[in-house]
Image (cartoon, rainbow, N blue to C red):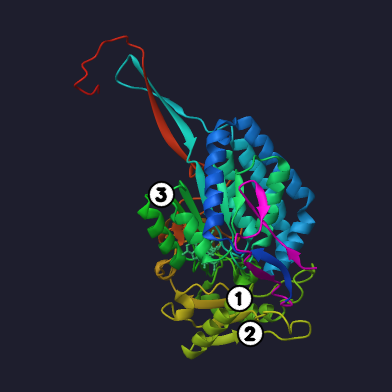
Amino acid sequence: MTVRYQMPVAGEWRDAADGGTMPAINPFDQEVHGWIPVATETDVEDAISAARGAFASCWRKTGPGERARLLNRVADLIDADADRLALLETTDNGKVIRETHNQMGYAARIFRYYAAWADKLHGDVVPLDQKDTLDLTIRVPFGVVACVTAWNSPVAILTNTLPAALAAGNCVILKPSEHASATTLEIARICEAAGFPSGVVQVVTGGGDVGRWLISSARVDKVSFTGSPGVGRLIAQAAGANLKPVTMELGGKSPNIVFDDADFDRALIGALAGIFGATGQTCIAGSRLLVQRGIYERMVDALAKRAGRIRMGDPRLKATEMGTAANEPQFTKILSFIDAAKGDGARLVAGGRRADGPGLEQGFFIEPTIFADVRNDMKVAREEIFGPVLSIIPFDEEDEAIAIANDTPYGLASGVWSENIGRCMRMMRAIDSGVVWINTYRVAAPQAPFGGMKDSGFGRVRGEAGILEFTQTKTVFVDFSGDRRDPFSMKF
Ligand code: NAD
């Protein structure tokens, strides 16, 4: 069945003003499963006007208890609908059902987590030298927040921002990726069913132009972006022109570092999880595996054998371990990186081409691919591929591992595998990344802040840091002295 989607804009579910649509394509069989509106500039302006109106007329006056109640209701509705949402996510972007199903449970947990924050955004009473003056600080929302997101995990990404922004009292306009918009529209339906007032949660769908119109508007107060550093730079410039604050969640080229003294089998699983989980289409992919020389060949052999056994197939089946590239441009891009690595002389030890076994013919499948003996200056080690392509790099000493790990423009995530606690602590301090996993990889929690350094972005999602991103501090002076003061000198 092909679904004709509409966008929630200005209190109605509507088509694009000019009727424009784009297909939602299942990357497993290339079937069109839906039609998504391509918003016009008028639709975007209407959404911004409605958000401004909703903020002024009701949302900024809505108390934290009510905000929490609505967020908890969304969590309940996501839980009740998790099977359908997970299936839709998998159909839309090819991510395996075993992960999308987990992501829906996680989404509900984040909504509940931020519901509990709504009435805990305390200000302070600040001690002053002026004994007859009281200083209060309060945390206030920005107003209208634009969230522009990527295609790899649409629901998981939007739950990094939407519940926190709402709990803090903002109205939100979401702009999902043109490659996977369906579940974002479904979450907006759930927000409506939960009882959020009209204009508080809206979605405009379409491509980069729609995002650009949204974030360039002087009537948007705060921008949150999840995507590539290239587009991130454009967004930072556009938001800068209006002096709007931005949170940037960008890409990565994360080092996953295995020392000789690691638990070998756990590190092997961690390396697999790091690069072949989510078909490598994840910002936190551990795409550079640094392995100490003493276990290097053993690790290369073991990984190559295990990669060859990864079950690819219909991502809707629970048994499937690795799904497709999420869309055709990404599929083509990943294959071109594989060709470049071959050309640069990296040693191919697993995969290396399109996967075309039985049942895979129509899908954008790529074999789990491993290159050994990679140098950190090769293209395959420097640029984010966003696919199932691992570069293995040997090293001898701890300092060398740190130097290689940090020799990248990115700084999102990293992994360290060692049984030596002192070494783990030294590495944790020395690696320039927003997340360090020690003897694990790809772990996340609503309570734990997440975000990048360097070209991987700035600002944080999740945890307390994640909600503070959507607030600003107001300071309030109350003078109870009764003095008639000198009007021509500031009172310090
Ligand atoms: P992208 O940068 O191409 O697009 C992201 C979003 O920006 C899309 O919605 C797109 O339509 C929109 N866009 C494009 N041009 C725009 C413009 N000029 N103005 C405003 N919006 C514009 O990224 P992608 O290919 O969708 O996603 C992959 C990237 O996202 C990777 O780099 C990945 O690492 C990153 N990512 C980061 C995180 C994180 O939390 N750090 C999470 C997921 C994905």
Task: Pinpoint residue 274: horizontal percent, then vertical percent.
Answer: 60, 67
- Name the one closer to the observer, 18 or 337: 18
- Disc 2 to disc 3, how far (Cα)? 45 Å
Q: Sequence-wise, which precedes: disc 2 or disc 3?
A: 3
- Name the one closer to the observer, 336 or 58: 58
**From the Cβ of disc 3, is ligand 1 less than 8 Å away?**
no
Mark 3: amino acid: Lys
- Name above or below for residue 166 compared with residue 417: above
Identity of the residue furthest to the left in this view: 488
Query: Which portion, as a residue range, is magenta?
Result: 1-30
Query: Do residues under tags 1 and 2 come within 8 Å of each other at their CB atoms?
Result: yes
Task: Pinpoint residue 13: horizontal percent, then vertical percent.
Answer: 68, 52
Can residue 353 be spotted in the picture? yes
Which residue in the structure is indicated by mark 2? 351
Mark 2: amino acid: Gly
Which residue in the structure is indicated by mark 3? 244
Task: Pinpoint residue 309: horizontal percent, then vertical percent.
Answer: 72, 79
Number of marks: 3
Q: Secondary structure at mark 1?
A: loop
- Name the one closer to the observer, 353 or 166: 166
Write the residue at 39% across / 29% down.
Answer: 475
Checking the image for residue 388, the label placed there is 1
Numbered disc in front, either 1 or 3: 3
Q: Sequence-wise, which precedes: disc 1 or disc 2?
A: 2
